[in-house]
Amino acid sequence: MKTCLSQASPLLDVERAAPAIGELHPWLLGEEFFGLERYPWPGHLPSLYRDPGILLRFLGGASNSWQESALFSAYYAWLARTRPELWTLCQAFMLCEPVEVERLETCLTPARCWMLRDAGVLAVEDGAYRSLARATPWQGRLMWHDAPPGFRESWVFLGADSLEFARQIARRSGRSGSRYGRVLDVCTGAGIHALMFAGMADRVVGVDINPRAIAFAKLNAELNAVANVTFCLSNLFDGVPPGRFNLVISNTPFVFLPDELRPRCVDGDGGAMGIELALKLIDGLSARLEPDGTAIIHANSPVVEGRDLLMEGLRARLGSGAWHVNLIPTHEFHDAAFYGLYRSHKIQRFVRYVIVLQAGQPFAVERPSLSPWRKVACALRIAMVRTQGRAQSDQRAN
């Protein structure tokens, strides 16, 4: 998650903008905007370890959506040279950078730009258009959500964490070939995971506490022609329609934030130590899952003095029940932006997990290890980030 703290930019009025986005969406597909999924996203030096895999996927035509690259400028230079109009659209609606009025109007036509401006999708600043909506390409679809900056109250974000969870659950679902009756997506955000399961389930329900997230999710379902998904407001399970579900999925907000940021980061705030919300969700599973149902949850765990706090919480809550727990680590990291907060709580690092909970099984906890190369890459990145965090902390102190 990006840590831009600007509050100046207005948020998109999703309902007002929906007709204009609905007109733009098929036009972007016709211009092969979905092909931008091959291209990585801007990264920094600590992202360099990702670049060999990014290059292989790029050459093979596979997805690099929201994969941060230290060498991103080389990919964008290639796009600008070979597909200049697509590069303009990438700048405007994927990267959400300012684009000169004349250049975007040449690409989109003046009439379409004026329509988007009148609908509040495009703002004009210093002779350039800037989009308040972002289109993230994923599996031939475009998913609409808020443009940066983040950390604004009711901001709706779809980024690297959402897509990594999508990749993880796609791998699991592809291997199992499962078909589900009812699927529940808690903390649905822009709806990407609910829409993913629409082709594998009779009915999917997506819920979120943020009304703007529900508006984006409904828009994305309509634009991507998905009919068997419904979305509704709910604080975790409070507003979920009656009945049990065969599968519950959730990309829970899991960032541990300073108190002053929590009210304006509903999309990322995981509560105390970043695990409070995930544990509340797990507490409510038994009442909403079928007796042999499955839950797949994306969450962070802080490691404090060698203790994995999420694992401890799972054991305390589920140890007396019939649950098989598989904690699949996908990443280990630290965040320089909150170095002081994490140091004050003795957090050494965070582990990103895909948690697979199978009901109706003898209690057991499995926790495979990251691959050796991945472990080393994460350790090097954590060392770099901690050094950066210390330097920033020292600068603020001086």
Image (cartoon, grey):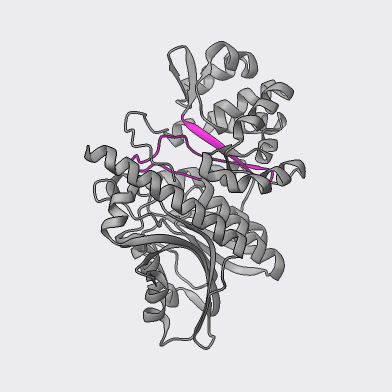
Q: Position of residue 14 (x, y in %)?
A: 45, 36
Q: Residue furthest left?
A: 398
> In screen coordinates, is 337 left or right of 331?
left
Q: Position of residue 39 (x, y in %)?
A: 65, 38
Query: Residue at left 25%, top 38%?
Result: 396
Magenta part of the protein: which range? 132-158
Query: Residue at left 56%, top 33%?
Result: 94
Query: Residue at left 54%, top 32%?
Result: 95
Residue 338 sits above or below residue 285 on the image: above
* Residue 211 included in the magenta stretch of the image: no
Q: Quadrant of the C terminus?
A: top left
Between 271 and 187, which is closer to the camera in this rendering? 271
The image shows a total of numbered marks equal to 0
* Residue 138 included in the magenta stretch of the image: yes
Between 116 and 320, which is closer to the camera in this rendering? 320
Residue 219 visible to the viewer: yes
Q: Quadrant of residue 200?
A: bottom right
Q: Quadrant of residue 20?
A: top right
Q: Position of residue 262 (x, y in %)?
A: 29, 49
Q: Position of residue 269 (x, y in %)?
A: 35, 53
Q: Quadrant of residue 234?
A: bottom left
Residue 177 visible to the viewer: no
Residue 77 sits above or below residue 338 on the image: above
Residue 195 sits above or below residue 212 on the image: below
Residue 239 sits above or below residue 12 on the image: below
Between 243 and 347, which is closer to the camera in this rendering? 347
Between 368 and 89, which is closer to the camera in this rendering? 368
> In screen coordinates, is 389 left or right of 372?
left
